[in-house]
């Protein structure tokens, strides 16, 4: 599923930039910010200023689990007529929507950090060559996910600025 996700997201963003001219600048900006964030996380990790331990992993996986549960609850609420105001509140309110997107960017950034640690441990433990691509794919998946979250955040910020 990860390969399908990475390919489809790449084509989706390429299609969006070709179709909607105003998103071309946002895609370029999101790509630049993604590169800067990844470089900053790599430098922080390599310098030892940020360490990935079990506590950080637990926090990150708890955040992603809470995020998934929240999205599922919002989808369920959107199908119940008496509760449709709840998803509308989160998606229609610009500040709350931007804050939720910012939390998504933080979670994706932390996953990039975890992937750097996974790659470092794989090299340190000399995993078999056949399995190295798992680490590379995981990092690529996290970077694409980070790009998507940054793109989503920028779209919401620019939409709020237009109002």
Image (spheres, rainbow, N blue to C red):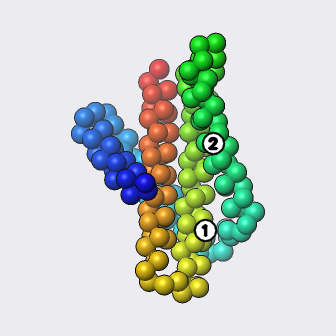
Q: Is residue 132 left or right of residue 78?
A: left
Residue 50 makes an appearance in the image:
yes
Residue 9 screen position, x and y as percent: 37, 48
Is 13 left, or right, of 79 in this rendering? Answer: left
Q: Please give the residue where the numbered disc 1 appears in the rendered image.
A: 44
Q: Residue 148, percent across and down?
A: 45, 46
54 shown above or below 6: below
For disc 2, the neighbor class at 10 Å (few under 14, some 14 to 19, many from 20) is: some
- State the residue at coordinates (56%, 34%): 98
Nearest the eye: 117 or 154: 117
Residue 7 image point, x, y percent: 34, 53
Residue 17: horizontal and vertical position, in percent? Answer: 29, 40
Q: Quadrant of the N terminus?
A: bottom left
Label 1, secondary structure: give it: helix
Q: Indicate left or right for 22 with 50 as reference.
A: left
- Mark nearest the camera among 1 and 2 is 2
Q: Which mark is residue 67?
A: 2
Residue that extends furthest to the right in the rendered view of this protein: 55
Q: Are marks 1 and 2 in contact (CB under 8 Å)?
A: no
Q: Quick one: SS at disc 2?
A: helix
Q: Is residue 53 above or below residue 108?
A: below
Vertical order, 97 against 81 (above or below): below
**Residue under the image location 58 percent in, 45 percent down:** 104
Measure the C-alpha gap from mark 1 to mark 2: 26 Å
Asked whether, in this view, residue 127 is left or right of residue 147, the answer is right
Q: Which mark is residue 148?
A: none
């Amino acid at each position: 599923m990860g390969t399908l996700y990475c390919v489809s997201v790449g084509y989706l963003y390429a299609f969006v930039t070709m179709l909607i001219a105003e998103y071309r600048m946002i895609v370029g900006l999101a790509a630049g910010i993604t590169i800067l964030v990844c470089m900053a996380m790599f430098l922080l990790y390599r310098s030892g200023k940020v360490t990935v331990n079990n506590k950080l992993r637990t926090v990150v996986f708890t955040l992603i689990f809470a995020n998934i549960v929240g999205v599922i609850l919002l989808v369920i609420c959107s199908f119940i007529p008496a509760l449709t105001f709840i998803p509308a509140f989160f998606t229609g309110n610009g500040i709350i929507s931007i804050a939720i997107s910012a939390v998504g960017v933080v979670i994706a950034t932390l996953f990039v950090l975890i992937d750097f640690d996974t790659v470092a441990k794989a090299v340190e433990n000399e995993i078999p060559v056949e399995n190295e691509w798992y680490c590379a794919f995981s990092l690529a998946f996290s970077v694409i996910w980070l790009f998507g979250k940054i793109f989503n955040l920028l779209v919401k910020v620019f939409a709020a600025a237009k109002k």
